[in-house]
Amino acid sequence: MRKAKVAVVVLLVAIMTMSFALTGCSSSRSSGSDSGDGAKSGDAKEDLVFITMPTEAEERWIKDGEELQKQIEDAGYKAELTFAQDKIEQQNSDIENAINKGAKIIIIGAKDGTAVGPAVEKAKEAGITVIAYDRLIMDTDAVDYYVTFQLEKVGVLEASYLIEKLGLEDGNKGPFNIELFTGSPDDNNAKYFFKGAWELLQPYFESGVLVSPSGKVTKDFTLDDWQDIAIDSWKMEKAQAEMESRLAKYGGGATHLDAVLSPYDGISKGVINAIEGQGLPWTPGTPDWPYITGQDAMTTALSDILIDKQGETVWKDTRVLAKKVAEVSVQILKGESVDAADTMNNNNIDVPSILLDSQSVTKNGESDASGTISVKEVVDSGYVTADEVGLK
Ligand code: GAL
């Protein structure tokens, strides 16, 4: 029985590996709505919407992609979903593929918002509408719409949580030891997340209330230096290695770490792993353990929040984002006007943008930051299950 199961698993892995190789390493999921459902050629519902997400290695992009594909299919259109496996070349070839297939719209969650520019320009030349999904596409006029969450607000929520927990507005003078991280240097979002946080934290660095024992952030650090504390591709392993090397300045725990500004749950997990891996004398759930922020409400982060390892995450409900982008896509396909009230500049044009709202999540929703909710409320929304996050 066991052997049979193993054989099935081996076979499945072999099939998956083969299809992975055949698709040039990207992973592609086509919609089934082109299966001869009687739609005539020239029927608008024949129109293809092509979705390229940056990676399948992170939970949120799978959720984003699948939700988006479902919403577009539910509206009666064809949708094809691909993942670029964190590779610029792969995303460019996915976009070429979309052009060859005659897609009407390409929705791009960019791996690298700048490097994707030339591929996007080809799509534009082919008359395809380009929607930048969550991450802005930079330095080109070939992007039609940008749909994301209010970027700076993410950083504001994270910094507000730390300021509250450290009692900085109550006049606590510390000095408090904090380590700051930013996201991937090739992602425009990372700068904006940090901008929101840095505007709130910078005065405390200036007055000496906040200090970074690692020396990574000093009094004269500026927003333009954000890439000095960036984590390539937002990778957990890279964050862990970076935190391990920063912890060398903490004398085995003799110097206390009070807080960590992390812009993303994967990075937070790397930080937690580093602290735990070094066996430092700090215990979750006690005042010894640092306050650690995050973003994305990943299941691992929500679990860690429940056991006091992570303090906070910023939840951007990807279902809402996917729904909005699907709605915009259908409007475009129907030739209706799109209501994009905001703009975001991409160093070339002001891209018509739709900016959605996010929320801070803590264990029991305990925080003064307005709109903070509990892990249970995220579960109750159906975004994750109680089992997945270990909620009793
Ligand atoms: C950003 C995104 C974040 C997070 C991060 C890592 O672009 O806005 O929510 O997902 O990438 O994937």
Image (cartoon, rainbow, N blue to C red):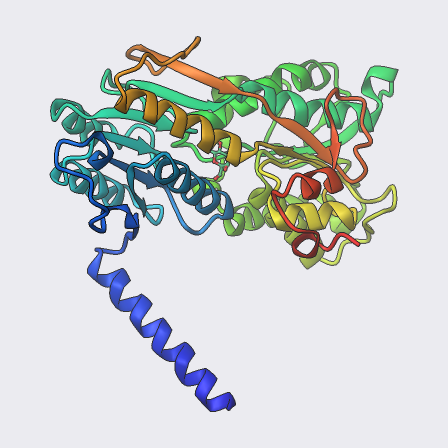
Vertical comparison of 324 with 242: above or below = above
Tell me residue 1's x, y (percent): 51, 91
Residues 252 and 112: in front is: 112
Determine the image quadrant of residue 388: bottom right
Residue that appears at 79% across and 46% down: 308
Q: Residue furthest front?
A: 38
Tell me residue 389's x, y (percent): 68, 52
Residue that appears at 49% across and 28% down: 190
Note whether residue 86 is visible.
Answer: yes
Tell me residue 181's x, y (percent): 58, 34
Quarter placement of the C terminus: bottom right
Q: Left or right: where does residue 378 sit relative to residue 32?
A: right
Residues 205 and 333: in front is: 333
Determine the image quadrant of residue 216: top right
Residues 126 and 17: in front is: 126
Tell me residue 37's x, y (percent): 23, 47
Residue that appears at 67% across and 49% down: 272
Q: Left or right: where does residue 363 sit relative to residue 25?
A: right
The number of discs equals: 0
Q: Left or right: where does residue 351 sit relative to residue 303?
A: left
Q: Left or right: where does residue 169 sit relative to residue 356?
A: right
Note whether residue 229 is visible.
Answer: no
Determine the image quadrant of residue 131: top left
